[in-house]
Image: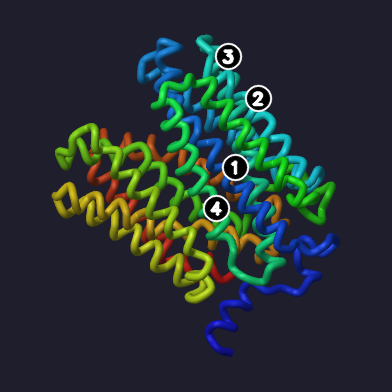
């Protein structure tokens, strides 16, 4: 068997092994709707980021209180992720994406206008729960659609989330920068989300699994638990870049505060570009090499930032982290569609929950190690963990 045929065979399964086997096989429009759904998820979550300073000012809270408040978003997401797979199986991906998107749109005006701390807490919990539901369900649909297509598509799907995030944050910042009020800006976001759903929502899958009345939740086990652990590491690294890259640049590399955010920007752009081109790369080289060399590249990027005391090199290092990590999680999600240990919808729920826990736990872990030892050593721990992902490539990618 030649290399192209070997790589292709990893994604092709007989129809009776596909989760969609009791339903019409997803085609082009289902693929497009999946991409749009990923775009909506990234667009919605990133549109909140430029509103944070406005919320802080309206609520009159300090940085510590704001940090606790922002945890409500993560808490809301974690509360729905474990059960999202069962909800998708019982009601279908289409209904759950519409349902969750509706609550995103309902909560946005409160996030943009409320001066009441209890209302802000409730709104963030609802917003986070809705985003968490969308995140899991679109990945369930992505696994089904990719398997039906017979080719690698997961990196491109996740690339649309990154693209949505880039456009969401940029457009919100642009609107607010031109003098639009936060309420007007979020109304534009809501119109965009609803408009995209009205056009493409009809092509979302009306099912999420063959097991329409399966278990509400199953603890991850076997290869699913291992994949969840690897996703936890990659998401932990991503959370570390989000919350600590600017601190690293200002405190250890002498970068001015006004430019420190460029480190995460380079990380994000590199990740987006890697994912948008990832399907071709995965098809050409296979998932094993993507996880292996991606983990090595990401670990090398962190090591470069640590051991070469130059601010410009640190920027390059953060870009390498984003490029290396960009296609690891999509490859791992594709593997979930091939494993036989758990139903796909429940496996995606479990892994998404574990992965998202990494985003929440990462910054706190880095902060604890940095306080106890040093920030450089904390980043070194992240590099070692990424190497663990790399050496696990065979087990994780070739399910």
Q: Secondary structure at mark 4?
A: helix
Which of the two discs, 3 and 2, sits closer to the camera?
2
Which of the two discs, 1 and 4, sits closer to the camera?
1
The answer for how far apart the CA atoms under marks 1 and 2 are is 15 Å
Q: Is residue 351 above or below residue 28?
A: above
What residue is pinned by disc 1?
40
Q: Looking at the image, tell me whether mark 1 or mark 4 is earlier in sequence order.
A: 1
Q: Secondary structure at mark 1?
A: helix
Mark 4 neighbour class, 10 Å CA radius: few under 14, some 14 to 19, many 20 or more:
many
What residue is pinned by disc 2?
106
Q: Looking at the image, tell me whether mark 3 or mark 2 is earlier in sequence order.
A: 2
The answer for how far apart the CA atoms under marks 3 and 1 are is 25 Å
Quarter residue 103 falls in: top right
Marks 3 & 2, CB-CB < 8 Å contact: no
Task: Report whether residue 299 is seen.
Answer: yes
Residue in view at x 53 percent, y 15 percent? 113
Left or right of 119 in this view: 88: right
Quarter residue 296 falls in: bottom left
Residue in view at x 53 percent, y 36 percent? 45
Mark 3 neighbour class, 10 Å CA radius: few under 14, some 14 to 19, many 20 or more:
few
């Amino acid at each position: 068997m030649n290399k192209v045929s070997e790589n292709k065979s990893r994604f092709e399964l007989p129809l009776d092994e596909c989760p969609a086997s009791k339903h019409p096989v997803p085609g082009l429009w289902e693929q497009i709707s999946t991409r749009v759904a990923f775009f909506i998820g990234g667009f919605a979550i990133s549109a909140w980021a430029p509103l944070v300073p406005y919320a802080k000012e309206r609520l009159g809270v300090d940085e510590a209180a704001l940090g606790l408040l922002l945890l409500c978003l993560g808490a809301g997401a974690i509360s729905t992720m474990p059960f999202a797979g069962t909800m998708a199986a019982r009601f279908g991906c289409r209904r759950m994406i519409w349902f969750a998107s509706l609550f995103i749109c309902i909560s946005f005006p409160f996030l943009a206008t409320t001066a009441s701390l209890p209302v802000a807490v409730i709104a963030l919990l609802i917003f986070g729960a809705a985003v968490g539901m969308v995140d899991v369900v679109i990945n369930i649909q992505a696994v089904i659609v990719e398997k039906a297509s017979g080719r690698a598509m997961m990196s491109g799907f996740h690339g649309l989330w990154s693209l949505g995030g880039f456009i969401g944050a940029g457009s919100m910042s642009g609107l607010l920068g031109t003098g639009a009020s936060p309420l007007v800006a979020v109304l534009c976001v809501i119109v965009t989300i609803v408009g995209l759903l009205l056009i493409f929502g009809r092509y979302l899958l009306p099912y999420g699994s063959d097991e329409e009345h399966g278990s509400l939740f199953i603890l991850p086990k076997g290869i699913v638990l291992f994949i969840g652990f690897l996703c936890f590491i990659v998401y932990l690294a991503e959370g570390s870049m989000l919350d600590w890259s600017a601190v690293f640049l200002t405190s250890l590399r002498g970068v001015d505060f006004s430019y420190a955010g460029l480190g995460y920007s380079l990380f994000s752009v590199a990740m987006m570009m890697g994912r948008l081109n990832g399907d071709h790369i995965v098809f050409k080289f296979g998932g094993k090499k993507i996880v292996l060399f991606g983990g090595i590249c990401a670990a090398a990027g962190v090591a470069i930032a640590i051991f070469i005391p130059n601010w410009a090199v640190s920027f390059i290092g953060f870009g390498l982290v984003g490029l290396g990590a960009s296609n690891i999680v999509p490859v791992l999600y594709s593997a979930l569609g091939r494993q036989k240990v758990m139903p796909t919808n429940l496996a995606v729920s479990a892994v998404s929950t574990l992965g998202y826990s990494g985003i929440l736990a990462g910054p706190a872990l880095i902060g604890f190690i940095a306080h106890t030892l040093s920030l450089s050593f904390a980043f070194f721990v992240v590099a070692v963990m990424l190497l663990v992902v790399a050496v696990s490539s065979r087990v994780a990618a070739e399910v």
